[in-house]
Image (cartoon, rainbow, N blue to C red):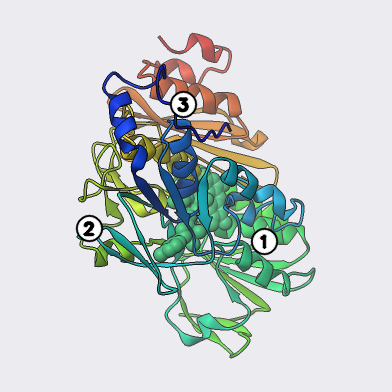
Amino acid sequence: MTIAATTEYEGLAHAAAGGVAELRSMNAEHIVVVGAGQAGCGIATELRKLRFGGRITLIGDETHMPYQRPPLSKAYLAGELPEERLSLVSGQRLREAGIDFRGGVRASGIDRRNRTLQLEDGSSIAYDRMAIATGGRNRALPWPEARADNVFSLRTIDDVRRMRDYWSAGKRLVVIGGGFIGLEVAATAVRAGLQVTVLEAQDRLLSRVTIPAVSDFFEKLHGAAGVTLRKNVQVVGLEGMPQVSAVVLADGTRLAADLVLVGIGLLPNTALAEVAGLEVRDGIVVDECARSSDPRIVAAGDCANHPSVWTGTRLRLESVQNAADQARTAAATLCGAATKPYRALPWFWSDQYDVKLQIAGISAPHDHLVLRGDPAFGAFTVFYFLAGRMIAADSLNRPQDHLFARRAIGGGLRVDPGRIADEAIPLSELSR
Ligand code: FAD
C-alpha cells in the first residue's frame, strides 16, 4: 500500500479533467471518517492515494490500531498468528500520511446543520465531509445470562482475549448458530481439543448462503473432526450466572457448557446515522457512489446498504471485499476524484480445517446448478446459472475455479453450462 500526503495536484494522470480543479478547491477541507475498521481505514488511506491534500481525521471507538477481523475466528484464535499481523496499517504510516487517528473514542452524534461530529468524551469536531464506516455488532440473545462471563460473541480482538481464559483442551464449547463464524470457531476449537457442539435452528448449516450439497459437505467435515451437530433445535435459555453452566433447548434438553459462543448474525451500526436523520433501511442507504441521503456524507462497509448491479436489488454485504472496494468508491466520491460507481463483483471466503470455501457472486435466485469436481475428494465447485448466465460459484479447495468464476461473471462472459461439468475441458476453453 502506498500512502502519500501531498498538496501537489498538478499533472496527476489519474485525475479527470475538472477533477483536478475540484481537488484543489478541497485542499482546505476536513474529512472526518467515523469507524476505523476495514472500510474506514480504507477510506482514509485511499483519500491520500487520490491526492486529497486536506485534513483527514479517523475516529475509532476501539483502543487498537485498525486491524483485520477474519483471522479472529481462525489463525489468531488458534494462537497461530501474532496480534501485530492483524494490523491494517501502522501508526507510523498513518502519521506519514497525515491521517489524524483518534482511537478509543466513540462518536455519539452528528449535527448536520453545523457540520460537527460529537464525541462521547464531550468534544466535537467540525467537518466539511464525512464518511460513516461503523460496521456492525453481533446480534445478542435476549436473556440476562447472555451477559455471563463465559458467553461470548466474536467481533473484536478483545472478544478473543476474553475467550482465551476459557479456551483449553477438554472444555465443553457450545456454539449457537451454524453460520460462518460459528463454524470457523468450531473448527478452531475442536483442533485445540475442546469438546464442541454446534446448535443450528435450521435443518442444515449455512442454509442462507449455499445449497444443500455444500451444507452436507460441511456437516460431514465437522462430524469427521469430532464436532457434535444438532440441527432443527431452538435455544430457549441459558442457565447460570455469573457463569453459564448449560444451554437449554426447547425440548427440555440441557447441554452442559464451560463456554458458549453466540454466532447468530450481525446488526449494522446505524444509530449515528438514524439520529442524524439519514435514510436507514437495513443499513445506511447509499447510492452507487456510496453517497448517503446527505451528499456530504458517504457510508461504506457492513453498515451500508447499496444498490447492486449484480442482483438489481439493494444489498448490505458483510465481507472484506465489500468493505475494501466500497471504501475506494466512497473516498473518490468524498474528494471529487473521477468517481467510479461501486460495481465490484461480491466475493467471500471462509476457512475451516484445511478447506477453503470461496464464493463468487450472489447465488440467489438461480435456476440451474452445475457441479465440477467431486465432493468425495474434498474439492469441487457449484456453479449457479440464471437464464443461461453464470451468476455465482461456491468453490471448495478449487481456487482456479473461483478465479475463473470471478473473471467470467465479472466480465459478463458466456459460459456453456453443458460443458463446465466436464473436467476434461480446461477452464480456459469454457468461456467466450
Ligand atoms: P468493521 O471492521 O466492524 O469496523 C467498524 C469499526 O467502527 C469498528 O472498529 C467499530 O468498533 C467502530 N465503530 C462503530 N461505531 C462507532 C462509533 N459510533 N464511533 C467510533 N467508532 C465506531 N469477511 C470475509 O470476507 N472473509 C472472512 O473470512 C471473514 N471472517 C470474519 C471473521 C470474523 C470473526 C468477523 C467478525 C468478521 C469476518 N469477516 C470476514 C467480515 C469482515 O471482517 C467484515 O465484513 C469487515 O470487517 C467489515 O468492515 P467494516 O469496516 O465495515 O466494519
Nearest the camera: 127 or 281? 127
x%, y% of residue 294? Answer: 21, 50
Query: Quadrant of residue 227 in the image?
Result: bottom right
Nearest the camera: 62 or 127? 127
Q: Secondary structure at mark 1?
A: loop
Task: Tell me the residue that label 2 is attached to.
Answer: 278
Task: Tell me the residue that label 1 is attached to.
Answer: 227
Q: Residue furthest bottom?
A: 241
Please give the name of the residue rendered at 65% of the width and 50% of the height, measured from the top-left corner: 86
Please name which of the two marks, 1 or 2, marks the residue nearer to the observer.
2
Q: Which mark is residue 155?
A: none
Task: Tell me the residue that label 3 is attached to.
Answer: 406
Please name which of the two marks, 3 or 1, marks the residue nearer to the observer.
3
Between the residue at mark 1 and the residue at mark 2, the CA separation in whole angstroms equals 44 Å
Q: Residues within 10 Å of mark 2 (few under 14, many from 20)?
A: some
Q: Residues within 10 Å of mark 1 (few under 14, many from 20)?
A: many
Specify the amino acid type for callout 3: Arg
Mark before the other along the chain sequence, 3 or 2: 2
Q: Is residue 26 above or below residue 101?
A: above
Please give the name of the residue rendered at 41% of the width and 41% of the height, measured from the top-left corner: 327
Between the residue at mark 3 and the residue at mark 2, the CA separation in whole angstroms equals 34 Å
Please name which of the two marks, 3 or 2, marks the residue nearer to the observer.
2
Please give the name of the residue rendered at 53% of the width and 15% of the height, measured from the top-left corner: 427
Specify the amino acid type for callout 1: Val
Q: Is residue 293 above or below residue 249?
A: above
Position of 167 with respect to 144 (left or right) is right
Position of 411 with respect to 160 (left or right) is left
Please give the name of the residue rendered at 42% of the width and 80% of the height, measured from the top-left corner: 142
Q: Tell me if the residue at label 1 has its CB under 8 Å from ligand 1.
A: no
